[in-house]
Image (cartoon, rainbow, N blue to C red):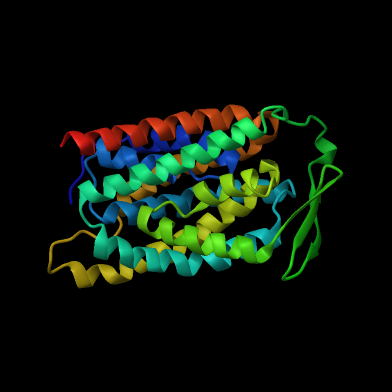
Amino acid sequence: MNLQTAIWLPPLAAFVISFFTSMGGISGAFLLLPLQISVLGFSSPAVTATNLVFNLVATPAGVYRYAREKRVIWPLALLIVAGTTPGVVAGGFLRLTYLPGAKRFKIFVALVLLWLGIRLALDIWKSRKTAHAPSKAGEWHARTAEFTCRRLVFEFRQQQYQCKPTGVFLLSLFVGLIGGIYGIGGAAIISPFLVAIYELPVYTVAGATLLGTFVTSLAGVSFYQLIAPFYQASGMAVAPNWTLGLSFGVGGMAGTYLGARTQRFIPPAWLKILLALIMFAVSISYLAGYLAS
């Protein structure tokens, strides 16, 4: 499939989106997908694989920055990777089998974005009195205190936080399934869930979810690339558009790094409000278009 667009548009769009979303531990792929469908007219299953290529290039810079500042909870990252990796492969099969058409896929995208927007809105309301970012740089390092099959405990800013490893794993498995269909890697769902349900600080969640996105995307890209020859006879585009994916990735890499570097100076509620509004707008637009057709 041949796509035409201004050479500066993909990296610029990816830079702006990733700069803000990486502060919440999200790569920004969930917003690039509607851009590709609506602006570029790219709606075949290959758009999912292309989105995952973007994640491969964009997320390592953010993970590096969070790790450098010692804000990656490595056991949490391990749980996310262990769950999302098999889920994304299963999601890929579902995408090719049940959601190959643009119209049906748009509805799926709309429902996912609507759910994400609602989750973020609830989190904003819940944390409205504690929206200010801390200012003491010396308190930013996170340390794992306990990691067993029953609970994960870590310390951050003289406070302890905990979650259940089995719950995180099962959530990651489900999210990986959605990520394989949607091409988002899953962090856009896992990050709001960890912040809203487990009440973990976004300043420590971001690095783990971005790392999970990278590994999941690697599995997803490999799956779509390997299975593509089996769909050539039917004319269905399945393999990623590497040129477009890498173009998005270059801008996303710069945006993700700068976003991770800037994150601790920005109150998380400001970013969540912006993201929620964008997700609601795209979701309503797709649903309205479906009802009108």
Q: Nearer the viewer, residue 285 or 240?
A: 285
The correct choice, above or below, for 70 with respect to 270 in the image is: below
Nearest to the observer: residue 247 or residue 178? 178
- Left or right of residue 292: residue 212: right
State whether residue 258 appears in this view.
no
**Position of residue 238 measured from the top left corner of the image (x, y, whole percent):** 25, 61
- Please name the residue shown 38% across and 62% down the image: 221
The mark total stands at: 0
Q: Is residue 138 left or right of residue 167?
A: right
Counting from the top left corner in percent of width and height, residue 278 is at 43, 31
x 41%, y 33%: residue = 280
In the image: residue 26, left or right of residue 13: right
Q: Position of residue 93 (x, y in %)?
A: 32, 67
**Quadrant (top left/top right/bottom left/bottom right) for the C terminus:** top left
| Residue at the (21%, 59%) spot, across then down | 237
Of residues 123 and 136, the one nearer the viewer is 123
Task: Give above or below for 176 relative to 204.
Answer: below
The percent position of residue 290, horizontal first and vertical second, equals 22, 39
Residue 151 in view, yes or no: yes
Q: Residue at x 74, y 68 (%)?
A: 150
